[in-house]
């Protein structure tokens, strides 16, 4: 049934008269965390959420105050251009000995120079470039649309903060004694930043201190939260690069992982009594599916579902609820795979399109409606469609609407399920 539906859907391009594509809905972005929303919680939950919000605001003000202090008396404000570099200039796949060399130390010093007072890092800065100068913003683009840019100053988006921490850990491991002291201190400050940023319910926001808007949602998008939890698992396991972390912080990391896994279990969606997948974002308080950017609807997301499943399959001795989550999530991924279609470029005028391709291997849509389990697609006007070919060409070409990422979970599951078979007592 699904195969036929998508073959016919792709044929709408050639035979538009037989097709009745529809705008299904319009996306509503996630709500920010606020005193008013916290005040509506059950009384027993308000204190910890109020404390969280108060701490976040204090840390943001401290970040801003530090920048103001650096700029006092400066005749000009330093500006850092937006820069792109592989892995943000932090090469994480070099041989261990490389991280004790001059180039790695230069990058590590740059990383420390860009660490915010709160302990995190801003994104879109090449750490392999030059160090931050006094008075320079932690993120590129001092002015945007006439307003001071204070966005993504501390974030886990696109591997930011977790990559910096992994790099510092690799460097300090090659520098025993006092030489590695600054890098260990920077790592521990960053670890504290991550622990501070975790919500009382176990989730992590995209930006911390909280910026507001959809950034306050629990963010799985682009593996943001999963990267954090994997790092905390490494710390908790005392892996070689992280063996220096004090026992008290190791225990904090383990506790944070437990809370995060509990949140993953709680946010797995169900349909008709069956477990399905996860979304890109969840409301910080209600943990309901949430939208983000205009073209990112509140829906099940196959790449993020894959990442959560891979993380769960990494857990040693997973409890029953985790095993059930994995079995259900993998079964759902199998059920929504698309066949006999291909997502490919056509002409410059028509752009990328979903087209019939008899015999083509499995692909998955990025998003699936949580009720109908059919693929959905968002446009910049917040409209949500059931046919990707309806989207404006800019958005159709500019987003990964289909892919094969879920195959990674299926491959790992083949061996994991031998150890933890479905239905076993």
Image: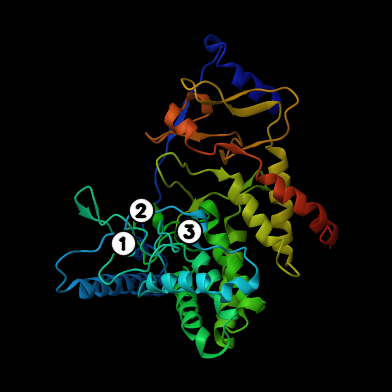
Q: Secondary structure at mark 1?
A: helix
Q: Earlier in the sequence, mark 3 or mark 1?
A: 1
228 up-or-down from 222: above or below:
below
Q: Residues within 10 Å of mark 3 (few under 14, many from 20)?
A: many
Query: Rounded to the nearest whole Å, what is the CA distance between mark 3 and mark 1?
Result: 38 Å
Query: Rounded to the nearest whole Å, what is the CA distance between mark 2 and mark 3?
Result: 11 Å
User: At 46% across and 72% down in the image, what residue appears?
Assistant: 106
Q: Secondary structure at mark 3?
A: helix
User: At 51% across and 70% down in the image, what residue appears?
Assistant: 103
| Disc 1: which residue | 36
- Location of residue 111 by image quarter: bottom left
Q: Secondary structure at mark 2?
A: loop
Contact (Cβ within 8 Å) of mark 1 with mark 2: no
| Disc 3: which residue | 88
| Disc 2: which residue | 82
Q: Position of residue 62 (x, y in %)?
A: 29, 75
- Location of residue 324 by image quarter: bottom right
Q: Earlier in the sequence, mark 2 or mark 3?
A: 2
302 up-or-down from 161: above or below:
above
- Colour approach in the figure: rainbow
Q: Tell me the quadrant of the picture where the N terminus can be found.
A: top right
Give the side of residue 255 with respect to residue 326, left or right.
Answer: left
Of residues 142 and 310, the one drawn nearer to the viewer in this rendering: 142
């Amino acid at each position: 049934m699904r195969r036929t539906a998508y073959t016919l859907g792709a044929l709408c391009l050639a035979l538009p008269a037989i097709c009745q594509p529809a705008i299904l809905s319009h996306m509503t972005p996630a709500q920010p965390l606020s005193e008013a929303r916290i005040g509506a919680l059950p009384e027993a939950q308000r204190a910890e959420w109020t404390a969280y919000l108060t701490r976040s605001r204090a840390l943001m003000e401290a970040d801003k105050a530090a920048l103001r202090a650096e700029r006092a008396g400066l005749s000009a404000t330093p500006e850092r251009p937006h820069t792109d570099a592989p892995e943000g200039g932090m090469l994480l796949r070099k041989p261990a000995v490389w991280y004790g060399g001059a180039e790695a130390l230069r990058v590590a010093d740059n990383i420390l120079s860009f660490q915010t007072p709160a302990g995190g890092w801003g994104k879109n800065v090449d750490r392999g470039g030059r160090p931050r100068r006094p008075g320079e913003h932690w993120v590129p683009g001092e002015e945007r649309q006439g307003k001071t840019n204070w966005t993504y100053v501390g974030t886990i988006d696109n591997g930011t903060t977790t990559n910096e921490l992994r790099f510092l850990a690799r460097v300090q491991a090659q520098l025993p004694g006092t030489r590695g002291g600054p890098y260990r201190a920077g790592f521990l400050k960053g670890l504290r930043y991550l622990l501070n940023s975790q919500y009382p319910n176990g989730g992590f926001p995209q930006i911390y201190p909280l910026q507001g808007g959809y950034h306050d949602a629990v963010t799985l998008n682009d593996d943001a939260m999963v990267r954090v939890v994997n790092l905390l698992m490494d710390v908790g396991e005392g892996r070689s690069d992280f063996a220096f972390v004090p026992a008290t912080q190791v225990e904090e990391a383990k506790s944070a992982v437990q809370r995060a896994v509990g949140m993953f279990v709680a946010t797995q969606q169900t349909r008709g009594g069956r477990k399905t997948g996860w979304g890109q974002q969840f409301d910080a308080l209600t943990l309901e599916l949430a939208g983000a950017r205009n073209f990112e609807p509140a829906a099940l997301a196959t790449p993020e579902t894959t990442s959560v499943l891979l993380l769960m399959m990494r857990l040693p001795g997973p409890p029953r609820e985790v095993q059930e989550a994995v079995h259900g999530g993998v079964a759902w991924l199998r059920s929504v795979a698309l066949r006999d279609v291909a997502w490919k470029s056509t002409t410059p005028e028509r752009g990328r399109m979903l087209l019939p391709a008899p015999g083509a291997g499995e692909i998955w849509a990025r998003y699936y409606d949580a009720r109908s389990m059919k693929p959905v697609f968002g446009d910049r006007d917040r409209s949500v469609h059931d046919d990707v070919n309806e989207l404006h060409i800019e958005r159709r070409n500019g987003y990964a609407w289909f892919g094969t990422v879920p195959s990674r979970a299926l491959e790992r599951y083949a061996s994991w399920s031998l150890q933890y078979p479905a239905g076993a007592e």
